[in-house]
Image (cartoon, rainbow, N blue to C red):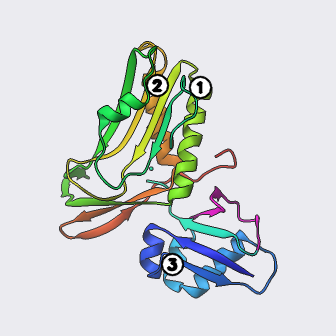
Amino acid sequence: MIVKILLFATLKDRAGVKSFDLALSDSEITVAAVRQAVAVRFPAVTKHLETAIAALNEEFAAPEMTVKDGDSIAFFPPVSGGSGESPAHPEIFLLPDAPYSIDAIIAAITIPATGAVCIFSGTVRGETTSVGEAQRTLRLEYEAYAPMALTKMRQVAQEIRMRWDGVQGIAIVQRIGVLEVGQNTVLIACSSAHRDGGCFEAARYGIDRLKEIVPVWKKDVRPDGSAWIEGGYYPTPQD
């Protein structure tokens, strides 16, 4: 049996490869056993595999789930980021590798009945204070497990709609690639008929949820070195 292994962020750096085919002797094997096999092949990633999240065919995977020939298994650290078909509920999900127009995104999620749009936009900080000491950032480098990231963006949008039925349009945009200080990194925008239609709450929920379940990571490049920034949230079966 042969399965395709995908590694991201710190695991990719430690292994020195982003993807590879893994040959296994059993016709059926669990995700946990695949994790062990990867550690045997790349001992340098063993420590990071212990806390890595697994995805089987672009969905979060429990250790006991069965892996079959031809499956794709991704391992990545906890997350630190298309268009809808309904004219009344426009949606846009993007992973651009170049600057985007906020005005164009607003236009894409507004309809004639829209009277309010709430936007959260993240930017690259050049200075972060930690334990009373300022640390400089030269740039951030973002990468994503793109197919799964777009799927989970759509899931976030579905969750928003279940909570705030007054939300009309939703945009979730996460930049990937190298971003300099001051550049936009992520955008969540929600539109509604009025400012009390849920757009404020929905945008806040969207960015918080994106950082939990959308597989996007960033590397912080500083004058004294670089490191991948990992989160602390581990997906549940409901995710």
The quarter of the image holding the N terminus is bottom right
The magenta stretch is 51-68
Q: Which residue type does callout 3 highlight?
A: Val
Mark 2: secondary structure: helix
Asked if 103 appears above or below 179 in the picture, the reply is above
* Residue identifier under label 3: 45
Estimate the spatial distance between the alpha carbons at disc 2 and disc 1, rounded to whole Å. Answer: 10 Å
Number of the front mark, 2 or 3: 2
Q: Are marks 2 and 1 in contact (CB under 8 Å)?
A: yes
Number of the front mark, 1 or 3: 1
Mark 3: secondary structure: helix
Q: Which residue type does callout 1 highlight?
A: Arg
Q: What is the x, y in percent for residue 55?
A: 63, 62
Q: Is residue 211 left or right of residue 142?
A: right
Q: What is the x, y in percent for residue 169?
A: 48, 27
Q: Which residue type does callout 2 highlight?
A: Glu
Q: What is the x, y in percent for residue 213?
A: 54, 49
* Residue identifier under label 1: 163
* Residue identifier under label 2: 201
